[in-house]
Amino acid sequence: MSKLHKQPGFQNLIDDNFAAAGVEFAMLTSVLVVLTLCTTDIVPVWLAYTHTSNASNIAGDIATSFEAIKKSDMSDVFVAASQSILPFDPSGLSLRISNVFISADGTSRIYWSCASGSLKPFNALDPIKLAYGSNTYSFMPWLSASSGASSTNVSDTSYLYSEVIYTYSSPAKIVFRSPFTLSSSNFYLPRISQYISFPSDVLPGAAGSVPSQAKKTISLSLDNGVFCTYAQ
């Protein structure tokens, strides 16, 4: 036996089992600390995504309640969406909301589009392709057709397409050290009419030009850094 093992103090330390609980506690504490620090970053990201999705829902839901939207009404839609992102910083929010008109031949074109932040409005009268291969059908008529309805059931109608992206920066920067983008999009059908006229306080008449008869694209700037295009 070595001289070291003959020393009573060291032999007592080897036979002592009370230190095992301390080692287990130290190992468990380190795991809990890592989980706590990760949760500090992960939970706010989930909340930020929830608020981003709410912003898209609010913008589309409010816009579909109109038959004709004034410039001030559209500005209010963007304000309401930006307020829904609180308590996160609204400056990181970009929103685009568009009225897509489906003509009798099934072609989907932009009737009007407004955007803020890093998103830009679609050009009015341009065909829009969101899904369904390379043709000019967009997601809503494709969904209707795939549900068993004839594609003619959605012609001469429109839908609203709401998009939101939010640039999130983690305050703690433990897990997510660099800013990244959260996004959400939604489709809505107008509640009152086949299409929603915009801007009703600029266009001649209460409803403006019928989308299928519109011939030119006009640009418009609103408050709060919102830019729009519309067909007339």
Image (tube, grey):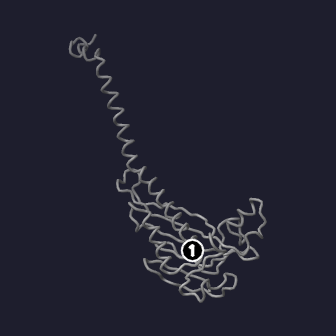
The location of residue 85, given as percent across then percent down, is 43, 62
The location of residue 147, given as percent across then percent down, is 74, 59
| Residue 13, quarter of picture | top left
> What residue do we see at 35% from left, 53% from top?
172
| Left or right: residue 17 compared with residue 210 | left
Rendered position, 80 above or below 39: below
Rendered position, 33 above or below 209: above
Residue underneath mark 1: 66
Rendered position, 46 above or below 149: above
Depth check, front residue: 63 or 112: 63
> What residue do we see at 66% from left, 70% from top?
129
| Left or right: residue 99 compared with residue 84 | right
Looking at the rendered image, the quarter that the N terminus falls into is top left
Q: Secondary structure at mark 1?
A: loop
| Left or right: residue 23 compared with residue 178 | left
Few, some or many C-alpha atoms within 10 Å of disc 1 (few <14, some 14-19, many ≥20)?
Answer: some
Q: As drawn, which residue projects farthest toward the bottom?
A: 204
- Which kind of residue does numbered mark 1 sit on? Phe
Depth check, front residue: 13 or 111: 111
The location of residue 148, given as percent across then percent down, is 77, 60
> What residue do we see at 36% from left, 32% from top?
28
| Residue 152, quarter of picture | bottom right
Rendered position, 94 above or below 53: below
The location of residue 95, given as percent across then percent down, is 50, 70
